[in-house]
């Protein structure tokens, strides 16, 4: 069915993509605008894939006519919350440059270099843009980006978005859906003052009139449900100055209520291990990976994330040339599936990189698009050279790998394929093309029965509507299929019926600053709480890490003492912890060969951390709470993780030597990481302990207060307790 999907939610000034699902590239689709606010001048989109920018708050209803009939989709639009914001930079902060080469990039313009240029006023670059309240990362760059570019955050004041969580069950003669709401930061609304709007999915047999709404609850009578055969999806948003990410529940004919947006249950307790595939073994083949599965078992990891394993001309694999076959140097598809089966036997899920924002420049479809072949000409985003910041390409030189991808068509002249940053080798796929959309959906289906999830590369470059279709499509096959997004900086919009797990860039950068001694260790607690402040819903999970295939090794940047504490932080804080291959073996280069003969002590340390997380539910599912403490160094931090059954105190030390920490709690004496007894000193000031890198103790009595000992301990590593 080509139905465009669930109701969409936006604010005035935002652009919303509308598109048929499971499209037939040969079919004809037409949009109509059936309803809009009285003061709106918006018109129906032209073409099968439309982009609308609503200009007034209220309800818009679009109708899509296609080969299977017509279907409607609503768009609920809230007031514009954007504020004019000025980005400024002193010219002297950029290395020697020509002002004509300077542009500004960020999420607000999809990181497209050369499109938005600041004005140079009295030695200062100035750029004005309308942005919603919150933090906005941006960069002043030269040309397409280089060393010396200046990146920073600009905070736009104003209220944050609220949050909502739906649940429900049968009460008497109806299903009652209840919304728990939480006001955004700096909001004038209290949690219980937020309005809640409920909407029945436009694809389902019931309408909004079937709901009896009162405040934060909605009722569906069991008599009404008797008339349906398929579940009814009910969406809701919390509304204050701004609207929340929408939540959704599915109500079955029997009254059963299922939460639609919850992530797969298995990922809540998983420890992820990322492998850069061409560096994991000397042979770099699936067969050689299969022989190393016992090593993964020994680490205790639950999920293996592989960088791209399908055909590519590059070592890293992010330039795809064939989406339907494994890379020839890594091995056959049969060998890959054998490796996945072996991982499954070991209880390890397998996730691989899905790269669909772009293809390799060498992909057959790019060649056909560049040549203007019918059916492929619109496969990529082509822009007129006349409106581009780029110089005239060498049309006589064939493919210039160092220059921008381009084509010449008699009627259009020279065009340049769109790409992000300076990524000349990976032109952006055009999701306005039904052929491209249909092709990428085939790719999604091709591997969905082989692996357990996708890590989606450059997820921020693919339209939200497409990701919502992917999520629905995969959930219909397997509700336990995982979607992990690479969206940097992260954005709560991708948690709305799209992705289960998101990169935690905030904690990553904070751990680097703490490890380098630039920030006190207690900053990690605020970093972990940031997603809630950013209005990520409580069902979203965040991947915590200290390094990955795009970042330098933490050990190289911060040293071994800080690395041990940082690894412990990732495995003792809430979220989904990730270990990057070689991290546990003492690797110092971000894509180096796996140091199989490396640091055995570090490996044993990581094994202990993973085992502690696996055997203590409070470390994976417990609430994070503050622990008032005192320490003789700001490189130490303490906090609690608590469930109804278990209460733990976690102590971390990122510095050299040993930290002395005092609390007034009664603690058990066995370190849950080492399994060894810890020496505690108790006096009128409280309980004092010494921490080299990490210690996890059970709390025997409630934590009420903590005071720090001013005692300085210079104990050697051999005195570690």
Image (spheres, helix red, strand yellow):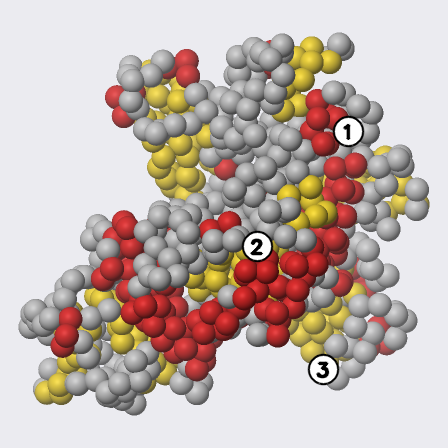
Q: Quadrant of residue 445?
A: bottom right
Which is more N-terminal, label 1 or label 2?
2
Residue 593 appears left or right of 148: right
Which of label 3 and label 2 is nearer to you? Answer: 2
Residue 313 visible in rendering: yes
Image point 76% across, 10% down: which residue?
A: 411
Rounded to the nearest whole Å, what is the CA distance between mark 2 and mark 1?
A: 34 Å
Rounded to the nearest whole Å, what is the CA distance between mark 3 and mark 2?
A: 56 Å
Determine whether the residue tagged by mark 2 lies in a helix, strand or loop. loop
Which of label 3 and label 1 is nearer to you? Answer: 1
Q: Is residue 45 above or below residue 465?
A: above
Q: In which quarter of the image is residue 347?
A: bottom right
Mark 3 nearby-residue class (10 Å; few <14, some 14–19, many ≥20): few
Image point 61% across, 20% down: which residue?
A: 399
Which is more N-terminal, label 2 or label 3?
3
Q: Is there a contact, CB below 8 Å, between mark 3 and mark 2? A: no
Image coordinates for residue 149, horizontal then vertical, percent:
35, 29
Q: Which of 249 and 217 is in front in this view?
A: 249
Q: Mark 2 points at which residue?
A: 285
Q: In this view, does 721 lie above or below 335?
A: below
Residue 385 appears left or right of 515: right
Q: Name the residue under label 1.
A: 376
Image coordinates for residue 627, horizontal then vertical, percent:
27, 74
Image point 74% across, 53% down: which residue?
A: 446
Residue 182 visible in rendering: no
Image coordinates for residue 124, horizontal then vertical, percent:
31, 20
Q: Residue 171 carries which label?
A: 3
Which is more N-terminal, label 1 or label 3?
3
Determine whether the residue tagged by mark 3 lies in a helix, strand or loop. strand
Residue 701 appears left or right of 257: left
Image point 62% across, 34% down: which residue?
A: 360
Q: Residue 266 carries which label?
A: none
């Amino acid at each position: 069915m080509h139905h465009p999907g669930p109701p969409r939610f936006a604010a005035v000034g935002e652009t919303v993509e509308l598109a048929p699902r499971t499209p037939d590239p040969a079919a004809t689709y037409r949009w109509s605008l059936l309803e809009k606010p009285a003061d709106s001048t918006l018109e129906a989109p032209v073409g099968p894939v439309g982009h609308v920018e609503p200009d007034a708050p209220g309800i818009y209803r679009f109708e899509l006519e296609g080969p299977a009939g017509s279907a409607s989709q609503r768009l609920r639009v809230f007031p514009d919350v954007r504020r004019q914001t000025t980005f400024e930079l002193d010219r002297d902060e950029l290395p020697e440059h020509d002002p004509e080469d300077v542009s500004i990039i960020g999420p607000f313009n999809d990181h497209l270099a050369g499109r938005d240029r600041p004005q140079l006023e009295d030695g200062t670059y100035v750029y004005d843009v309308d942005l919603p309240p919150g933090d906005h990362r941006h960069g002043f760059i030269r040309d397409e980006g280089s060393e010396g570019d200046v990146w920073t955050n600009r905070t736009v004041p104003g209220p944050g978005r609220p949050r909502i969580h739906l649940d429900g069950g049968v009460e008497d003669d109806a299903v009652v859906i209840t919304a728990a709401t939480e006001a955004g930061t700096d909001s004038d609304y209290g949690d219980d003052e937020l309005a809640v709007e409920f909407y029945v999915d436009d694809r389902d047999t019931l309408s909004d009139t079937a709901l009896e709404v009162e405040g934060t609850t909605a009722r569906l009578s069991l008599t009404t449900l008797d008339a349906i055969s398929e579940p009814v999806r009910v969406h809701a948003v919390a509304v204050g100055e701004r609207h929340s990410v929408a939540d959704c529940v599915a109500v079955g004919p029997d009254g059963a209520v299922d939460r639609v947006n919850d992530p797969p249950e298995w990922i809540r307790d998983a420890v992820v291990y990322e492998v850069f595939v061409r560096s994991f073994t000397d042979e770099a083949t699936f067969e050689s990976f299969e022989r190393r599965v016992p090593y993964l078992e020994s680490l205790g990891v639950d999920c293996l994330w592989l960088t791209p394993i399908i055909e590519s001309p590059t070592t890293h694999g992010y330039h795809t040339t064939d989406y339907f076959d494994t890379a020839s140097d890594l091995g056959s598809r049969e060998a890959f599936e054998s490796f996945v089966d072996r991982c499954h036997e070991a209880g390890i899920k397998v996730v691989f990189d899905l790269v669909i924002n772009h293809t390799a420049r060498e992909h057959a479809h790019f060649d056909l698009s560049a040549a203007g072949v019918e059916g492929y000409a619109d496969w990529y985003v082509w822009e007129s050279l006349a409106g581009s910041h780029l110089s005239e390409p060498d049309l006589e030189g064939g493919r210039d790998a160092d220059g921008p991808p381009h084509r010449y068509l008699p009627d259009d002249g020279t065009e340049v394929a769109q790409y992000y940053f300076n990524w000349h080798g990976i032109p952006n796929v055009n999701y306005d093309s039904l052929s491209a959309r249909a092709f990428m959906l085939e790719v999604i289906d091709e591997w969905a029965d082989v692996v357990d999830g996708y890590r989606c590369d450059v997820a921020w470059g693919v339209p939200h509507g497409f990701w919502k279709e992917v999520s629905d499509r995969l959930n219909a096959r397997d509700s336990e299929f995982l979607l992990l997004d690479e969206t940097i900086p992260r954005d709560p919009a991708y948690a709305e019926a799209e992705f289960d797990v998101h990169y935690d860039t905030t904690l990553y950068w904070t751990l680097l600053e703490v490890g380098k001694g630039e920030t006190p260790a207690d900053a990690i607690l605020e970093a972990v709480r940031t997603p809630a402040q950013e209005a990520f819903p409580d069902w979203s999970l965040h991947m915590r890490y200290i390094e990955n295939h795009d970042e330098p090794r933490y050990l190289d940047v911060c040293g071994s003492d800080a690395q041990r504490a940082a690894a412990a932080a990732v495995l003792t804080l809430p979220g989904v912890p990730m270990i990057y291959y070689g991290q546990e073996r003492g690797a110092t280069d971000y894509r180096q060969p796996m140091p199989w003969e490396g640091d055995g002590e570090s490996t044993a340390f990581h094994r202990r951390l993973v085992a502690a997380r696996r055997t203590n539910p409070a470390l994976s599912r417990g609430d994070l709470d503050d622990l008032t403490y005192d320490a003789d160094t700001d490189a130490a931090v303490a906090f609690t993780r608590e469930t109804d059954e278990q209460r733990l105190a976690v102590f971390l030390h990122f510095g050299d030597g040993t930290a002395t920490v005092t609390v007034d709690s009664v603690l058990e004496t066995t370190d849950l990481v080492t399994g060894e007894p810890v020496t505690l000193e108790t006096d009128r000031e409280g309980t004092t302990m010494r921490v080299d890198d990490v210690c996890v103790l059970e709390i025997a009595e409630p934590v009420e207060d903590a005071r720090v000992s001013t005692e300085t301990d210079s104990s050697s590593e051999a005195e570690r307790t």
